[in-house]
Image (tube, rainbow, N blue to C red):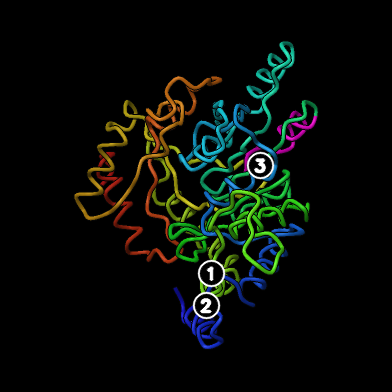
Amino acid sequence: MEPADMAMVQAAFTSNWIAPSGPDLDAFEKEFAAKVGARHATAVSSGTAALHLALKVTGIQPGDEVICSTLTFVASANPIRYLGATPIFIDSDRETWNLNPALLAEFLEKRARIGRIPRALVLVHLYGQSADIKPIKELCDRYGVIIVEDAAEALGATYHGKTPGTFGRCGIFSFNGNKIITTSGGGMLVSDDPILVQQAKFLATQARDHEEYYQHSQIGYNYRLSNILAALGRSQLRVLDARVAARRETFARYQELLDGIDGLEFMPEASFGRSSRWLVCVLIDPVRFGMNHESVRLALGAENIEARSVWKPMHMQPLYEGCERIGGAVAEQLFDQGLCLPSGSNLPMYDLERVVAVVRRCAGRV
């Protein structure tokens, strides 16, 4: 948080527009849409709420099948179940750590032969890295599969110069406290379709009909972002580019200081775009490195340094046991060897060097 953030929040308090609506909320939606290159946006209470609404307004029904990346946070998959639909998980590729287009092609071709094309795809952009959208979109257009993009972790990234999250029918972003910009909790749904966004906004405000009295003909949700948090979001949005630059610089410093360590590999940056480097992710080969990633995590923890494992794939989660999956070996290896290092935009150099010192010590490279 910076002084400008407090100034914007204080101005919202002074205006007495607190919640749920207000001028800062309207402005945040317009400014965010302009920043990412979408025509329309609606601000909600979380990225999960945005994804739930995106799937709802694109017509997902109970019994539908929805494809999802297996290597992701559980919030990418749970809204599929909220709507009574069935998730199908697809493995990652090594270039992006995101959904593998070749596996998607094989799966859709197989399903087309038996006349069972899934209704939609939740396309996740992981750890600040865009998926390879072009071949995936071509496949989905060919087979009539709706794309909803989960760009919760990829604000500030690019794909051929455009923002991931703006290629599908809807895209969603998160402003949770751990994201590159934050409203403490919050999310955004974007689309070029004004009707979809208006439907999402309607559902997010308890689906109140346009009557003078309180009338409700549909089930709605209490999902709107407050004007106060939107004021914070407007301030944070203004420093997004600086935050991305800081994260990329942090990543570059880690690469420089950990260069040459056998068995340690950084998450690659795909050739088709720029990663925001939301998190610094590494793979640790226990044979070549001499220690597994969990031992490194514990060694960091002993120095009061928090690190975390890469997401556990959805097909390995007890919650989704028995769901259909396509592949899985790549995601399993990334989970088995992956570690996320401290990556904050305000990470001081002396703290980064503390992390590096522990990692080098674990590798026997003091």
Residue 156 is situated, as x and y percent measured from the top left of the image, at 61, 57
- 3 and 1 marks in contact (CB < 8 Å): no
Q: Mark 1 belongs to which amino acid?
A: Ser
Q: Mark 3 belongs to which amino acid?
A: Val
Sequence-wise, which precedes: disc 1 or disc 2? 2
Taking depth in this image into account, of 225 and 123 the one nearest to the observer is 225
Q: Nearer the viewer, mark 3 or mark 1?
A: 1
Q: Secondary structure at mark 2?
A: loop
Numbered tag placed on residue 201 in the rendering: none
Q: Residue at x 56, y 27 (%)?
A: 86
Residue 176 is situated, as x and y percent measured from the top left of the image, at 47, 58
Badge 2 is on which residue? 18
Give the magenta part as a residue range: 130-141
Residue 193 is situated, as x and y percent measured from the top left of the image, at 78, 52
Q: How dense is the environment of label 3, judged by Cα within 10 Å: few (below 14), some, or many (20 and up)?
A: many
Q: Quadrant of residue 103?
A: top right
Badge 1 is on which residue? 226
Q: Nearer the viewer, mark 3 or mark 2?
A: 2
Residue 132 is situated, as x and y percent measured from the top left of the image, at 67, 37
Taking depth in this image into account, of 212 and 187 the one nearest to the observer is 212
- 1 and 2 marks in contact (CB < 8 Å): yes
Vertically, is 67 above or below 354?
above
Q: Quadrant of the N terminus?
A: bottom left
Sequence-wise, which precedes: disc 3 or disc 2? 2
Q: Quadrant of residue 41?
A: bottom right
Taking depth in this image into account, of 177 and 272 the one nearest to the observer is 177
Badge 3 is on which residue? 148
- 3 and 2 marks in contact (CB < 8 Å): no
Q: Is residue 134 magenta?
A: yes
Vertically, is 108 above or below 310?
above
